[in-house]
Image: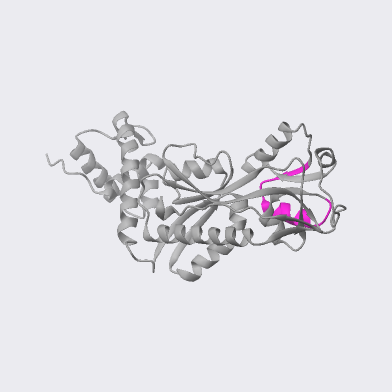
Amino acid sequence: MNRNPMIARSIRYLLAVAKHQSFTRAAEALYVSQPTLSQQIKQLEEVLDVQLLDRSGRSVRLTAAGEIYARYAKRALGELDAAQRAVNELNDLSRGSIRLGMTPITEYLSAPLLNEFHSLHPGIAVNSIEMTQEDIERSVAEDRIDLGIAFTNVLTTKAHSNDIDSHILFVETLNLAIGKEHELAGKEQTLDEQSLEGIPLIMLNTDFALRRHFDVYCIEHGITPNIVMETNSLSIIIQTVRLGQLATILPESISCSHADLAPVRLTPELPYHTTTMFCRKGAHKSPACEAFAELMSNWFSSRCAQSTNKEIRVGKMAKPALSSNTKALSNA
């Protein structure tokens, strides 16, 4: 019997039947006729010389052999899809796609970057998804996204997975951020930990690295923060702080970029953080992905250079901005 590998279509048909547990529903989902679908799967079983589906019950299920085959088939399809993208996008920046994962903080900082990339390469589709850092690392390792941009602790920028490379793009400090109508606005002072305890805060929830970094800071310095609101939306935090009743913790670049917000220095100083890029170790990088990574590295390098040459002012206070090193993905 001919044992040449079956085409990907037959494997997709098998996985669809396993998902829907029905030939009829699978055929409808794939927009093919049921006889065509059944025939393809039957031919696959003949080539493998094993029964992959149990058709005896009211619903169709994978056999034990089918479970094993499907597990490997999913991986194979993922590699085939990656190969197809690589071929189609080879040295052609007029079309293609990039899958990005960003934390709420980095997504906010990277909006101008996305706009610039679209201006340079309007034919490339960008799919940007808001995720936690853990989800970004997992998605990069599983090849569900091409690049991840995350907010991480400056001391723990190494990815948790051995399948991921991490590259520091930008380093800066955190500050208390207040609205221009807040009672502390315009006052020349540095707040200590006792003063911080009396300020009502709105914060990201504990799914996010910024919040966890702040919680560690509070534990280390014996601070009991007055967190009155939690959310998973940075936009809600910024709009709320602008009203002047509540404060929050933000990277200095965000609080300084809003005319209605101002950073306030704390003592002990809040921890530094990094904006870090994650990519899958050893994975093929399409020309579109390489172009985005290069633009991103250059863009963050420019931000670092601008920060080095200016002062960030809070009321009448001034502090030097932090410079940092950057590393391009293309040099990894």
Quarter of the image with the N terminus in it: top left
Q: Nearer the viewer, residue 4 or 136?
A: 136
Q: Is residue 274 left or right of residue 92?
A: right
Q: Position of residue 297 (x, y in %)?
A: 49, 57
Q: Position of residue 194 (x, y in %)?
A: 84, 38
Q: Nearer the viewer, residue 284 or 301?
A: 301
Q: Which quadrant would residue 316 be assigned to in this image?
A: bottom right
Q: How many marks?
A: 0
Q: Nearer the viewer, residue 12 or 326?
A: 326
Find out whether residue 105 is within the magenta segment. no
Q: Is residue 10 left or right of residue 170?
A: left
The answer to whether any part of residue 208 appears in the image is no
Q: Position of residue 162 (x, y in %)?
A: 43, 37
The answer to whether any part of residue 24 appears in the image is yes
Q: Which quadrant would residue 261 be assigned to in this image?
A: bottom right
Find out whether residue 237 is within the magenta segment. yes
Residue located at (50% from left, 40% from top):
158
Extreme left residue here? 1
Q: Which quadrant would residue 68 be assigned to in this image?
A: top left
The chosen color scheme is one colour
The image shows residue 254, relative to residue 78, as above or below, that is: below
Magenta highlight range: 228-245
Q: Nearer the viewer, residue 46 or 316?
A: 316
The image shows residue 249, relative to residue 124, as above or below, that is: above
Residue located at (51% from left, 53% from top):
326
